[in-house]
Image (tube, rainbow, N blue to C red):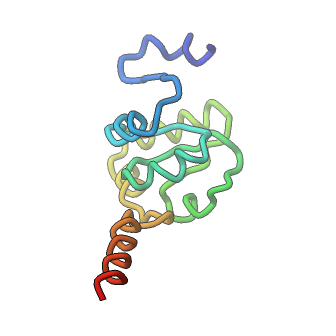
Amino acid sequence: ELAGEILNDLDRVHLIEPLDVFDFHNYASRSHLILTDSGGVQEEAPSLGVPVLVLRDTTERPEGVAAGTLKLAGVEEEVIFGLADELLSDASAHQSMAKASNPYGDGEASRRIVDAIVERFTR
């Protein structure tokens, strides 16, 4: 509620209810930056090339921080604002996170599984 009171009148900020997976991927893939405390979002957004500010002091996804796809922003307003401002105004900082290597895979697992099944059953 507090976030809504402060942010609802901003044209380029969207506070939304939880989404199903299809709608989430649609919204996230068109986002410039995601601020979240969700572990699932921390794993999925790097596959979409979207930088993530993690609104926590710690994360269960330290590999994302190490890879540069996530930044721990903590919970202090000034720090969150500073990091968000940097990623919204500095194209090279944004690109650095958006193009960082995804530590959660390359998105080709399904293809590899299908190839292995086809290989196995066409011998």
Q: Residue at x 53, y 43 (%)?
A: 53
- The residue sitting at the bottom extreme is 123
Q: How many marks?
A: 0
Residue 45: percent from the left, percent from the top?
A: 45, 48
Q: Nearer the viewer, residue 101 or 44?
A: 44
Q: Residue at x 47, y 50 (%)?
A: 44
Q: Nearer the viewer, residue 1 or 87?
A: 1
Residue 118: percent from the left, percent from the top?
A: 31, 77
Q: Nearer the viewer, residue 50 or 104?
A: 104
- The residue sitting at the left extreme is 122
Residue 34: percent from the left, percent from the top?
A: 47, 39
Residue 104: percent from the left, percent from the top?
A: 50, 63
Q: Is residue 110 left or right of residue 72?
A: left
Q: Residue at x 40, y 55 (%)?
A: 47
Can you say which quadrant of the picture contains the N terminus? Answer: top right
Q: Nearer the viewer, residue 111 or 122?
A: 122
Can you say which quadrant of the picture contains the C terminus? Answer: bottom left
Within the image, what quadrant is residue 114 found in?
bottom left
